[in-house]
Image: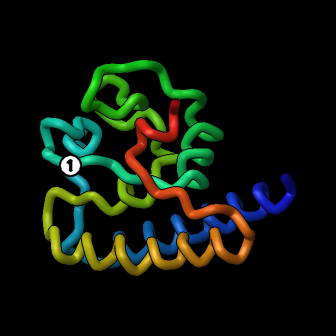
Amino acid sequence: MEAHVEALAELRRIYGKADEEARGNPALRCELSGRCCRFREAGHVLFVTRLEYDEMVRCGGAPGAGEEGVCPWLRGGLCGNREGRALACRTYFCSDEAAAAALTERHHREIRRLHERHGIPYDYRPLHGHAR
């Protein structure tokens, strides 16, 4: 259990680096539209690792049943779990898709190595698959 707690702390550091890098790139901007939370409407599926899902629950509480194709933490049209949101949520930008994808891939590799270092199985699947 302690390894899991340490891994979550390290995950938050990875998130912090990704957030900082995104803030430093003028091509990337969040329009606060909530589109990233409406998966079906945006035409995407949010994939997260088990560790990322655990951090989402730690910060935002257990997800409700919610509407299919919509993030269970969507509140009032915006993210209701801003602190605990996954890497893909942090790097989903309605602006420069190529820059956002590069940012995601770079930091996702760190998350995969994090799982390996802490002996946590790398379970990467759609968000709703973890909730079951």
Rendered position, 11 above or below 24: above
**Front residue (pair 120, 83):** 120
Secondary structure at badge 1 equals: loop
Total numbered badges shown on the rendered structure: 1
The residue at the point 69 percent across, 63 percent down is: 120
Which residue, as the protein is rendered here, is positioned at the far right? 2
**Front residue (pair 50, 78):** 50
Q: Position of residue 47 (x, y in %)?
A: 38, 53
Quarter of the image where one finds residue 100: bottom left
Badge 1: residue crowd in 10 Å (few <14, some 14–19, many ≥20)? few
Quarter of the image where one finds residue 42: top left
The residue at the point 37 percent across, 25 percent down is: 75
Q: How is the image coloured?
A: rainbow
Rendered position, 39 above or below 24: above
Decide if residue 102 is on the left or right side of residue 47.
left
Rendered position, 132 above or below 111: above
Q: Position of residue 113 (x, y in %)?
A: 59, 78
The residue at the point 53 percent across, 57 percent down is: 123
Decide if residue 96 is on the left or right side of residue 122.
left
Give the residue type that dot 1 points to: His
Q: Which residue is mark 1?
A: 44
Decide if residue 8 is on the left or right side of residue 3.
left
Q: Position of residue 29 (x, y in %)?
A: 23, 62
Q: Position of residue 19 (x, y in %)?
A: 44, 67
Decide if residue 6 is on the left or right side of residue 18.
right
Rendered position, 127 above or below 107: above
